[in-house]
Amino acid sequence: MTKIYHFIGIKGSGMSALALMLHQMGHKVQGSDVDKYYFTQRGLEQAGIKILPFDAKNIQADYEIIAGNAFRPDNNVEIAYANEHGISYKRYHEFLGSFMRDFVSFGVAGAHGKTSTTGILSHVLSNITDTSYLIGDGTGRGSAGAKYFVFESDEYERHFMPYHPEYSIITNIDFDHPDYFTSLEDVFNAFNDYAKQITKGLFIYGEDEQLRRITSEAPIYYYGFEKDNDFVAHDLLRSTTGSTFKVSYRGQELGEFHIPTFGRHNIMNATAVIGLLYVSGFDLNLVREHLKTFAGVKRRFTEKVVNGTVIIDDFAHHPTEIIATLDAARQKYPSKEIVAIFQPHTFTRTIALLDEFADALNQADAVYLAQIYGSAREVDHGDVKVEDLAEKIVKRVQVVSVDNVSPLLDHDNAVYVFMGAGDIQTYEYSFERLLSNLTSNVQ
């Protein structure tokens, strides 16, 4: 009898990607979740994967059950039923830790840039050889015959500790998830513990002072812009069509590379991938060829044009990510006003990084703020409001509601960058409807 994989919380970004991958490998997959639409469900629906409402009846003892980390006995009937009846299940990261042992695995960790870097590595490697992968934007690809497995390695609640990949990239260390980590040192200790589990090669952004402290049994290779790194990106040419740059390895020139994406951070992400694939024995000419066709990942600088207006959608929810996204927007649209629409994600993060958020958003020409998107994990919302952030921003700033985004129309030659990890897309859709209605009214 074919084993059935049942996902509790299948619309989660990692969960949906894993479900797609197992489905493509020939396994029978189903899952359950809330009715609310989430962008990851489109791929599941296209694959014909059944999405059920949460119900204790979905749980069978002979299923392989994979549970999303947000779900517990007190907030989910399926987890409660499984616990009550002694039915075993694994959390996403526990399942992944055992699953990857059948492959040569490549992990991508870091406070920021994990999804984009996993996307680049997955794209290049799967075009060179048969590769399975999991990307944090909800994209997964599975192949029963694949030798290689690329995956995103998430530090939250130390979920990456069951992972023992042969190779891993670490993009940076930053203080985030203040609802779990107590300090930057606490974050560092988690990454350092993870690094000790890598067996063949660790690729680290060398200009991150925290990362320079990392130790590992595996050989460590540093990448960056400065000459004291092993892999150095230099001779950068950033244009409105992407970024061209050269890479050298310990003084040896590896040639010129081009990526059709924007921002200095994406040059670094690509350099990490080049370094990893070079050390692990892949043909750099093939790497060079496939970097040119990387189209990006979902909700990372995703663009559309509505009624002649450029709208960018991005998952940026930390000050470092906001700065990187606005830098990318300025590279691609140097002559346009950059308008940021930002929704703070979680009260704990907003309180902890209030000044840093203000500094980051001041990189835009104008700022519009949505109400703070709280997490189900937060019992105490603390003493912070979005207006507290607005007071610290020196650029033109206004708080808007999802029902009234018309103040955004007060710009003539602008690019609108919607950023956040909550439901910022509802504000984006409101603005798109407003733009579309303007067209129909004119006609």
Image: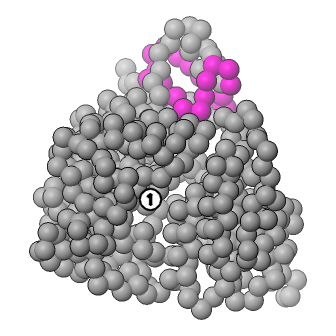
The answer to which image quadrant residue 366 occupies is bottom right
Instruction: State the image coordinates of residue 1 (x, y, percent, origin top left).
Output: 37, 20
Q: Is residue 9 rendered to the left or right of residue 367?
A: left
For the point 16% across and 55% down, which residue is it? 280
Residue at image coords 18%, 44%: 218
Instruction: Check if residue 59 falls in the magenta segment.
Output: yes
238 over 31 or under it: above or below: below
Q: Quadrant of residue 230?
A: bottom left
Q: Tag 1: residue type?
A: Gly
Q: Position of residue 319 (x, y in %)?
A: 58, 61
Look at 33% across and 41% down and name the residue there.
Answer: 192
Q: Nearer the viewer, residue 123 or 333?
A: 333
Instruction: Please say which color scheme the image uses.
Output: one colour
In the depicted structure, whether residue 209 falls above or below residue 430: above
The residue sitting at 65% across, 80% down in the picture is: 338
Q: Is residue 179 magenta-colored?
A: no
Q: Residue furthest top?
A: 85
Number of other residues with Cα within 10 Å of mark 1, as a class: few under 14, some 14 to 19, many 20 or more:
many
Task: State whether residue 37 appears in this view.
Answer: no
Q: Quadrant of residue 326?
A: bottom right
Return the residue at label 1: 113
Image coordinates of residue 97 in percent, x first then y, are: 34, 32
Tell me if I can see residue 321 in this picture. Answer: yes
Name the outermost residue toward the bottom. Answer: 335
Residue 170 position in % (x across, y down): 34, 52
Please give the range of residues in magenta: 51-75
Q: Secondary structure at mark 1?
A: loop
